[in-house]
């Protein structure tokens, strides 16, 4: 089987880094490049973290392009309290020796996708600023993307940044609005499913038995995140939000997908950034994406752990 | 046990009329009056329907007050496609002989609640215009009311009017906003639980085993409602939202509840009228109501069917 070629647009971020780990541990996936954006951390930190993590994983050959500093319209919203001041929890990776490619992420995305239309899939696990601007800058971009998987939104589930909104979408709702309505074939992975994929402290401990640099990295990376969720929810675990996007390739049978018209509130009121699905077709619009509404979460976490143990 | 004294604020409405009948069929509650509001039908039509349903059950002495004709801010939105042009589906009740009382709905609410402090339970099963107006006109009703049960909102469940919003709340979101933040002790019954309570054609057949005007009415009114549910939502049977809310006043064990901070979007955007719960305490605000999020649907439907049979028997035997 030819591995699936993907580019990840990312704001590392603890669970972003875990996504790199899982992608590189999965023979079904060929990670072609990363583009960075503001989100969990500033774009400078995100870029540094992407380069440092790839270098740590002996994957410095994978190009990294630095993207947008700011959301399209709203203010910058970095979340140090979740991901630690560095963005990678308590990890202490050395500064990367590699540099990002000279191009801006928007141009890099356009160049890569237009060079091989329909060949590469785009995984967006941060706010959607880079993708939205690529769509607006190059009208042919949308049709050149084979498919897109987005970690974002909360359909029936409560939000994780406001009562209703999920972080990635809330951090740039206008960009999400552009992407959702772009015509790109989208699979959305919302909190409804990611919150069912909990990596518990005991799982991190289990990985420690392999006594590898990877298991140490995961322990350090998740420490702050685990502390945050324990304090916030009383649960001794953290959700594998971003890594779950890769389940669409390596374990799609675990996900229950429905074709729906999905939109995002950009009205600026109390529901700003709320992602919703038109289940009863009251909006009268055709489905614009597939949305994951259920997952066999424990099986996904087990798969994640197994791949980390063999990496 | 002394029955609980209740007033129903209502926009009858197919499921409203079933809620009124359920109140009359339930010895645990004593129906003290109906206040009518716009919503499923115009207020005028709703008043006629309320009076007709009371006459059907031979309880014309129960007062009916004409309430607000329009939402506080939004334009009028009625639901003839759901409830029929006259609000009661295919039922054709005779013109009522009785008349509404002179008092406006909100005045009746204020008077009844203030003169019986701690005694009156209000069951609001339409848009909240009358209730909001009463709160603003006489803030002391917040303390004087015993409890407020609301049929409204869609928390995790999808809306039935927009993708996000439930009908009663969408029709007058500003009124809902006033009521939610009033400090009244509220129990909310959202679509999350009502959409699990589906009255099937078979259930209506069970009610019809008793021969009287009431089962015929229930059959005619729900047949239209079932056609709507089939055509618009692919549901076989009909969702009886309002009777569930009424039942919770005396059978709270039918549902499971959580306490949450709940708010409604009044920003005018695509989420207008969306009712949401702050499950993960992102707002830092304390709970302002109890919300039903789990339900035992067949227990409720069986209770409803049995009580409709009992009411039909007792009304036709003149008890």
Image: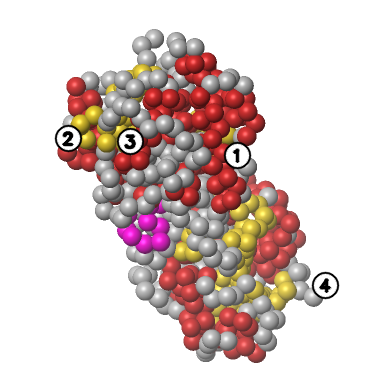
Which image quarter is the N terminus of chain B in? top left
Q: Which residues are magenta?
A: B266-277
Q: Give the mark nearest the N terminus, 3 or 1.
A: 3
Foreground pick, B208 / A47: B208
Instruction: Please give the residue where the numbered disc 1 appears in the rendered image.
Output: B237
Disc number for residue A1: 4
Q: Do the residues at discs 2 and 3 belong to one chain?
A: yes
> Chain letter of disc 1?
B
Task: Looking at the image, tell me whether mark 1 or mark 2 is earlier in sequence order.
Answer: 2
Q: Is residue B146 above or below residue A308?
A: above
Q: Nearer the viewer, mark 2 or mark 3?
A: 3
Q: In the image, which disc is placed on residue B138?
A: 2
Q: Is residue B143 above or below residue A27?
A: above
The local secondary structure at tag 1 comes to loop
Structural distance between the alpha carbons of marks 2 and 3: 24 Å
Q: Is residue B249 left or right of residue B112?
A: right
Q: Secondary structure at mark 4?
A: loop
Residue under pointer 3 = B47
Q: Which of label 4 and label 2 is nearer to you? A: 2
Give percent across and percent down for residue A131.
Answer: 52, 77
Depth check, front residue: B257 or B67: B67
Q: Quadrant of the C terminus of chain B?
A: top left
Return the residue found at the far right: A1
Image quadrant in which you'd find residue B298: top right
- In percent of width and height, residue A46 lies at 49, 72
């Amino acid at each position: 089987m030819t591995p699936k070629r993907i580019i990840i647009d990312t704001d590392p971020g603890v669970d972003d880094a875990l996504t790199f780990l899982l992608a590189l541990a999965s023979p079904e996936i060929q990670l072609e490049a990363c583009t960075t954006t503001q989100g969990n951390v500033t774009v400078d930190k995100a870029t540094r973290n992407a380069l440092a993590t790839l270098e740590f994983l002996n994957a410095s050959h994978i190009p990294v392009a630095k993207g947008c500093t700011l959301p399209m319209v709203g203010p910058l919203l970095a979340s140090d309290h979740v991901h630690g001041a560095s963005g990678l929890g308590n990890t202490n990776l050395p500064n990367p020796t590699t540099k990002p490619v000279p191009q801006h992420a928007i141009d890099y995305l356009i160049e890569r996708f237009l060079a091989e239309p329909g060949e590469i899939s785009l995984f967006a696990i941060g706010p959607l600023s880079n993708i939205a601007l690529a769509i607006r800058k190059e009208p042919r971009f949308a049709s050149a993307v084979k498919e897109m998987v987005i970690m974002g939104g909360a359909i029936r589930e409560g939000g994780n940044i406001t009562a209703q909104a999920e972080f990635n979408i809330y951090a740039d709702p206008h960009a999400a609005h552009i992407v959702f309505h772009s015509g790109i074939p989208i699979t959305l992975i919302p909190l409804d499913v990611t919150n069912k994929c909990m990596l518990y402290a005991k799982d991190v401990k289990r990985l420690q038995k392999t006594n590898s640099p990877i298991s140490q990295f995961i322990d350090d990376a998740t420490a702050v995140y685990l502390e945050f969720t324990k304090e916030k929810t009383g649960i001794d675990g953290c959700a594998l939000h971003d890594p779950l996007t890769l389940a669409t390739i390596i374990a799609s049978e675990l996900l229950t997908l429905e074709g729906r018209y999905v939109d995002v509130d950009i009205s600026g009121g109390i529901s700003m950034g709320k992602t919703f699905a038109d289940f009863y077709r009251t909006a009268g619009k055709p489905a614009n994406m597939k949305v994951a509404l259920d997952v066999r979460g424990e099986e996904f976490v087990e798969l994640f752990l197994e791949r980390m143990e063999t990496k | 046990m002394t029955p609980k004294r209740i007033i129903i604020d209502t926009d009858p409405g197919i499921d409203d009329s079933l809620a009124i009948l359920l109140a009359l069929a339930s010895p645990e509650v004593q129906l003290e009056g109906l206040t009518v509001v716009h919503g499923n039908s115009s207020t005028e039509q709703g008043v006629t329907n309320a009076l007709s349903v009371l006459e059907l059950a031979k309880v014309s002495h129960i007062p009916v007050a004409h309430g607000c004709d329009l939402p506080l801010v939004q334009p009028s939105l009625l639901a003839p496609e759901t409830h029929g042009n006259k609000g009661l589906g295919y039922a054709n009740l005779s013109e009522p002989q009785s008349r509404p009382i002179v008092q406006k709905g909100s005045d009746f609410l204020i008077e009844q609640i203030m003169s019986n402090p701690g005694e009156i339970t209000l069951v609001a099963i339409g848009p909240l215009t009358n209730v909001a107006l009463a709160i603003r006109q006489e803030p002391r009703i917040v303390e004087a009311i015993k409890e407020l049960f609301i049929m409204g909102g869609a928390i995790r469940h999808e809306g039935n009017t927009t993708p996000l919003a439930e009908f009663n709340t969408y029709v007058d979101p500003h009124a809902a906003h006033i009521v939610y933040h009033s400090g009244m002790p509220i129990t909310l019954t959202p679509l999350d639980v009502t959409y699990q309570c589906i009255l099937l054609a078979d259930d209506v057949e069970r009610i019809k085993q008793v021969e009287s005007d009431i089962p015929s009415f229930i059959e005619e009114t729900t047949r239209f409602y079932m056609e709507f549910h089939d055509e618009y939502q692919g549901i076989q049977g009909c969702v009886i939202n309002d009777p569930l809310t009424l039942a919770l006043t005396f059978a709270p064990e039918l549902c499971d509840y959580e306490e949450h901070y709940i708010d409604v979007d009044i920003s005018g955007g695509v989420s207008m009228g969306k009712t949401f719960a702050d499950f993960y305490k992102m707002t830092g605000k304390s709970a302002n109501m109890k919300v039903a999020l789990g339900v035992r649907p067949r227990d409720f439907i069986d209770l409803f069917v049995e009580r409709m049979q009992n009411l039909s028997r007792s009304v036709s035997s003149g008890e």
